[in-house]
Amino acid sequence: MGVTRIIKRATSVTILVLLLYYVIDIEGFNWSYLNNFSDLIIFLVILIAGLYMNGLQLYIMLKNQSVNLSLIDQFLLPVSMALFGYLVPVNGGMLFSLFFMKKKLSVDIKEGLSIGVYSLYISFLLTGLIGFLYCIFYNNQLVVILPLSFILILFPLIVNIITFNLDKVKLKKMPFLGKVTGFLRNVSVSSNSQFKNRRSLIQLLIINVLMIVVHIASTYWLISMLNLKVPLLSVALITLFMRMSSLVRVFPGNIGIDELFAGGIFAFFGLSPSDGIVLVIYSRVIALLFLLIPGGLLHIYLNRKVLKLENLKDLKGIFTTT
């Protein structure tokens, strides 16, 4: 294990321990609200629905490339991706998805990345549009939400401008960087070409809207389980902001980062930061114990002959030519 990886994991654990100390010893949070078994089952069902929609989104994008993702993989691949987000620092879920698509589905790495980028584009566009509409109808939080919404809406354009201007940078003395920029440009071109399929675009937009609704429902249900008093509109905005925290994948599973982000968002909306921290911790524990660990291990076991994943270091070889 490299020094950098050890530092990242140690930092995540340290942040999480400090946050737990803040929540338990300073804020004195009452954990007795979390003992309702029926509420837990409903929360798990909502989480499963959200994970399946991620798989359905992958199914549609792969179908555009004449690649079929089986029903079991539609359910379990997003689970494995989420699990590997904890095991491999910096976008472990994306690395596993590329590894899986290359090994089992024979999808080129460039095409696999273009699928991920295209999915990100759609998510950004939709989230930015919702934030923009909120500013128009409620005329609230314009200083923060309106600029952020414009950035999200324009994100695909910004990425393309940067990518296609990399050619103008002289990299003759650094041929490796030249290859990297060429690879990124090809990924960007492939991602942009997928916007031409209007039927697929409409389907993905609908799925993303449903995913947002499911995420809002899961957040609202968990807030109700914790007996917190948060207005539904605030829950919706908190959920949209939390979707953005997934962009910063520096530590394994974003442990500590998501908790800090949630605490900051709750404080921004005039709520208790400790409530936001508890919300993320409880959601994380439930997902890991009841979904990600058993579901991820089952998925890897079912595909053990195809993946031949004997060591996490195998993920580093996904960019090698087969």
Image: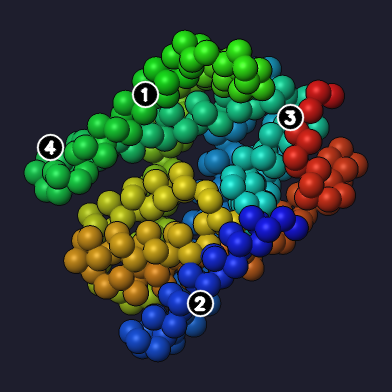
Image quadrant in which the C terminus is located: top right
The residue indicated by pointer 2 is: 17
Question: Badge 4: few (under 14), some or many (20 or more) residues near its Cα, within 10 Å?
Answer: few
The residue indicated by pointer 3 is: 319
In the picture shown, does residue 196 fall above or below 139? above
Q: Give the spatial CA distance, label 3 vs label 2.
A: 36 Å
Identified by mark 4, the residue type is: Ile
Q: Give the spatial CA distance, label 3 vs label 1.
A: 26 Å
Which is more toward the observer, 100 or 311?
Answer: 311
Question: Mark 4 or 1, which is nearer the eye?
Answer: 1
Identified by mark 1, the residue type is: Ile
Horizontal side of residue 249 vs 64, given as left or right: left
The residue indicated by pointer 1 is: 158
In the image, farthest residue toward the front: 173
Q: Earlier in the sequence, mark 3 or mark 1?
A: 1
In the image, farthest residue toward the right: 305
Q: Are marks 3 and 2 in contact (CB under 8 Å)?
A: no
Q: Residue at x 38, y 34 (%)?
A: 124
